[in-house]
Image (cartoon, grey):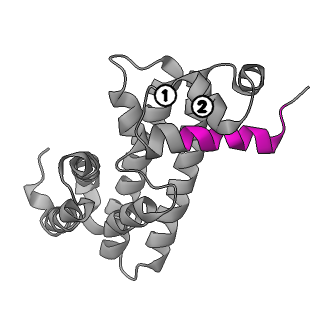
Amino acid sequence: MGTRESTRNRLLDAVDELVFARGDTHASVDRILERAGVSPATLYRAYGSKDALVAAALDRRQREWLEVWDEAVARADTDRERLLAVFDALEEFQARATGARWCAFLGTAAGYAEPPPVLAEAVRQDTDSLRRRLLKLSEALVGPRAAALADALTLLVSGHLAMRLRTGSPASSSGVARELAALLIDHPERLPG
């Protein structure tokens, strides 16, 4: 017997709230079950393990993030603005009701000395997706320097997300990150590599 979609969503919502929005990367299964209002058997029937549940929640969050980013890119008028739209999307995503203080993927990775394989794979896919998209958006602007720019912007985006933990105001690093990205875009000859 399968698990209803509404029950699966309640489990995903519980992880989203407890683990990602509240930042409790080691929320117990009991807390997740209590928040979702389901039994342990339901969780294990639906996902097989807590790690698989967290990976499924990361996958859902990734799809939602990419929708927000795609919308920000679609609103941009120039190739330069399309590339910088990642910073607009980060702010929009954080402002949502399910927004988090920082990146759910970085938080998940930081919560373990060595993440379980299913979680390590989710984090790797997020990183690869970020870099691939930045690379594609960079190609129109800097041609052969696109890979170096995508690597630098991946680092800049990750650093910006991490700074949200250090400062009292996430907006304080947002403008700086965007300005640094613009400098990198405007001066690709200064990129390493």
Residue 69, position in %: x, y?
46, 63
Task: Tell which of 164 and 70 is nearer to you.
Answer: 164
Q: In the figure, residue 32 lies in which quadrant?
A: top right
**Position of residue 146 in the picture relative to residue 53 (left or right):** left
Q: Is residue 143 above or below residue 59?
A: below
- Category of crowding for the residue at label 1, using alpha-carbon neighbours closer than 10 angstroms: few (below 14), some (14–19), many (at least 20): some
Question: What count of labels does the image hold?
Answer: 2
Are circles 1 and 2 on residues that touch, CB within 8 Å? yes
Task: Tell which of 170 and 131 is nearer to you.
Answer: 170
**Position of residue 12 in the picture relative to residue 138 (left or right):** right
Q: Measuring 25% from the left and 65% from the top, which residue is drawn there?
A: 171
Residue to which mark 2 is pinned = 32
Residue to which mark 1 is pinned = 27
The dominant secondary structure in magenta is helix
Residue 51, position in %: x, y?
56, 23
Q: CA distance from mark 1 to mark 2?
A: 7 Å
Q: In the figure, residue 47 lies in which quadrant?
A: top right
Residue 182, position in %: x, y?
19, 68
Q: Does residue 11 belong to the magenta stretch?
A: yes
Region of the chain picked out in magenta, as a range: 3-16
Direction left: furthest residue: 190
**Position of residue 135 in the picture relative to residue 28 (left or right):** left
Q: Earlier in the sequence, mark 1 or mark 2?
A: 1
Three-letter amino acid code at the position of disc 1:
Ala
